[in-house]
Amino acid sequence: MNERLPQYLHKPVQILWFGSDEFVLVITVIFVAVILGGMLGWGLVAGLLLFVPWLRTKPRGFIPHMAWRWGLVGFRHYPGPTQTRFFE
């Protein structure tokens, strides 16, 4: 009997047609664009329209891992992004 195991044990969270990472990014950029207004606000929206399709080519969890790599966030029980040696 052959059984197939899915890549993910559950479906990713999806709000409207955005993933959870994308949704937070879209809402944040639109909020900042409305506050700034003018050409800078429209530039942020245009940048978002270019960034979201590029982001969809990346694997799940790409944004949090980039934030970890840049040192903006830390994951529990993970070494720092500059750690090169590991001792058990």
Image (cartoon, rainbow, N blue to C red):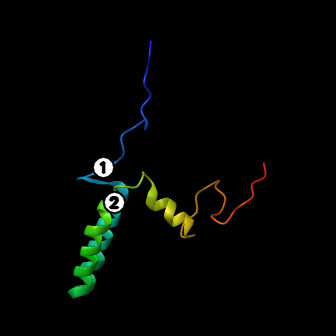
Dot 1: element: strand
Residue 71: where, in percent of width, then height? 57, 70
Residue at coordinates 24% horizontally, 52% vertically from top-left? 17
Dot 2: element: helix
Residue type for callout 2: Glu
Residue, far bottom: 38
Residue type for callout 1: Gln
Residue at coordinates 61% horizontally, 55% vertically from top-left? 76
Residue, far top: 1
Residue 50: where, in percent of width, then height? 28, 68
Residue 3, image quadrant: top left
Q: Do the numbered discs 1 and 2 sit on residues whose CB atoms are within 8 Å?
A: no
- Quarter of the image with the N terminus in it: top left
Mark 1 or mark 2: whose residue is earlier in sequence: 1
Residue 52: where, in percent of width, then height? 30, 63
Residue at coordinates 29% horizontally, 60% vertically from top-left? 53
